[in-house]
């Protein structure tokens, strides 16, 4: 699929298109933020917020602009807001649009997670950063909904969805070589 096709599919709410766009552009946005913040945790948090906001506002994207540039601009603006607040606070997202990223059938990552030996799986999960461990634990071990996780962690639902996508990707990358 071309970039434009992915964007159009994502505008229609296709979760797989969101995931492909995030996979394609995560490293660029993360590298940009890491260079600005010099802090891996803060860079990841800003990336999560950036993708959540981009997916929430995807209908405002204009195709005459480069999608990567649009994402990095969102990321830069979020970082500026954080610097103004002088703390890492989760941005307030428009809650009425929080359901744009929908649950779908289990992904390949979900199937890998359920098929693995629990002991090995837990070891891999423990190697992830604590905020990723937490969302995986709440979603797959406590079986909470996105909404319940968002309420428990006091974060916008889109941030939870992006954190889970990222955590599953990192976990899958560790599990696939096995």
Image (cartoon, rainbow, N blue to C red):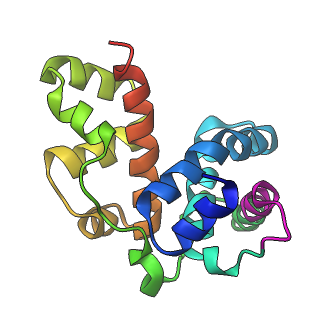
Total label count?
Answer: 0
**Which residue is more in the foreground, 61 or 71?**
61
The outermost residue toward the top is: 178
Stretch in magenta: 63-76
- Where residue 7 appears, as percent x and y from the top left, is 62, 65
Residue at the image point whose x is 15% and y is 53% from the top: 143
Horizontal side of residue 75 vs 155, given as left or right:
right
The outermost residue toward the front is: 1
Residue at the image point whose x is 31% and y is 29% from the top: 125
- Where residue 36 appears, as percent x and y from the top left, is 81, 44
Question: Would you say residue 70 sits in the magenta stretch?
Answer: yes
Question: Would you say residue 118 sits in the magenta stretch?
Answer: no
Q: Is residue 130 above or below residue 87?
A: above
- Where residue 138 appears, as percent x and y from the top left, is 23, 50
Q: Is residue 41 above or below residue 178?
A: below
Quarter occupied by the C terminus? top left
Quarter residue 115 falls in = top left
Horizontal side of residue 54 vs 126, given as left or right:
right
Horizontal side of residue 67 vs 110, given as left or right:
right
- Where residue 132 appears, as percent x and y from the top left, is 39, 41
Main SS, magenta region, reads helix
Quarter residue 4 falls in = bottom right
Residue at the image point whose x is 42% and y is 61% from the top: 15
Residue at the image point whose x is 17% and y is 34% from the top: 114
The outermost residue toward the right is: 64
């Amino acid at each position: 699929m071309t970039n434009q096709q992915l964007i159009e599919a994502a505008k229609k709410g296709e979760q797989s298109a969101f995931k492909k766009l995030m996979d394609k552009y995560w490293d660029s946005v993360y590298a940009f933020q890491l260079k600005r913040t010099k802090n891996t945790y803060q860079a990841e948090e800003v990336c999560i917020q950036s993708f959540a906001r981009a997916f929430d506002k995807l209908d405002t994207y204009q195709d005459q602009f480069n999608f990567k540039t649009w994402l990095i601009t969102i990321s830069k603006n979020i970082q500026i807001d954080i610097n103004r607040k002088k703390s890492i606070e989760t941005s307030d997202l428009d809650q009425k649009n929080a359901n744009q990223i929908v649950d779908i059938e289990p992904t390949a990552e979900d199937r890998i997670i359920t098929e693995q030996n629990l002991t090995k799986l837990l070891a891999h999960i423990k190697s992830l950063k604590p905020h990723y461990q937490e969302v995986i634990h709440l979603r797959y071990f406590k079986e909470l909904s996105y909404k319940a996780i968002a309420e428990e962690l006091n974060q916008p639902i889109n941030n939870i969805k992006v954190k889970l996508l990222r955590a599953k990707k990192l976990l899958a990358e560790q599990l696939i070589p096995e």
